[in-house]
Amino acid sequence: MTEYLAERTLVNMRFGLSIKRPGINAVNEKIALEMAISALEKQIPAQPVNDGAFGKCPDCGYEFNSELLEEYNLKFCLNCGKKIKHC
């Protein structure tokens, strides 16, 4: 499912479509909701996993130099987009 289709499906759901109906619309609605939930979860800041001079994203495990968080004021994982909480 594309982001555009997910957005359109969510707009239609706001106007009274029921996710309990069988068929392709129910499948699209479920996928759209899962995409929305995933996007919202990425906005919740998480502490990076501290591994000495390196840190890891708590979601995807992407490794980065911990000093770069402060030096470049990084707020999100460069790999998956998860919001990173600064110490």
Image (spheres, rainbow, N blue to C red):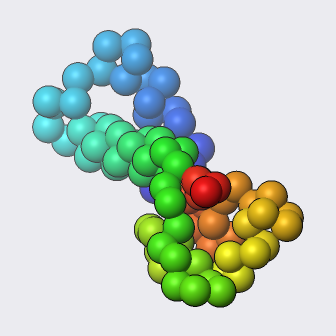
Q: Nearer the viewer, residue 31 or 73?
A: 73
Q: Residue at x 24, y 38 (%)?
A: 26
Vertical arrangement, residue 23 with respect to residue 14, above or below:
below
Q: Report whether 14 appears left or right of 43.
A: left
Q: Nearer the viewer, residue 79 or 56?
A: 56
Q: Quadrant of residue 54?
A: bottom right
Q: Is residue 14 visible?
A: yes
Instruction: Identify the residue at the far right of this view.
Output: 72
Vertical arrangement, residue 44 with respect to residue 57, above or below:
above
Q: Quadrant of the C terminus?
A: bottom right
Q: Report whether 75 appears left or right of 28.
A: right
Vertical arrangement, residue 79 with respect to residue 45, above or below:
below
Q: Residue at x 35, y 48 (%)?
A: 34
Instruction: Identify the residue at the far top of this view.
Output: 15
Q: Residue at x 53, y 36 (%)?
A: 7
Q: Quadrant of residue 76?
A: bottom right
Vertical arrangement, residue 72 with respect to residue 3, above or below:
below
Q: Position of residue 75 (x, y in %)?
A: 70, 55
Q: Is residue 35 visible?
A: no
Q: Position of residue 22 (x, y in %)?
A: 14, 37
Q: Position of residue 14 (x, y in %)?
A: 40, 17
Q: Nearer the viewer, residue 37 or 74?
A: 74
Q: Nearer the viewer, residue 5 or 44?
A: 44
Q: Report whether 84 appears left or right of 34.
A: right
Q: Position of residue 78 (x, y in %)?
A: 68, 70
Give the tally of numbered discs.
0
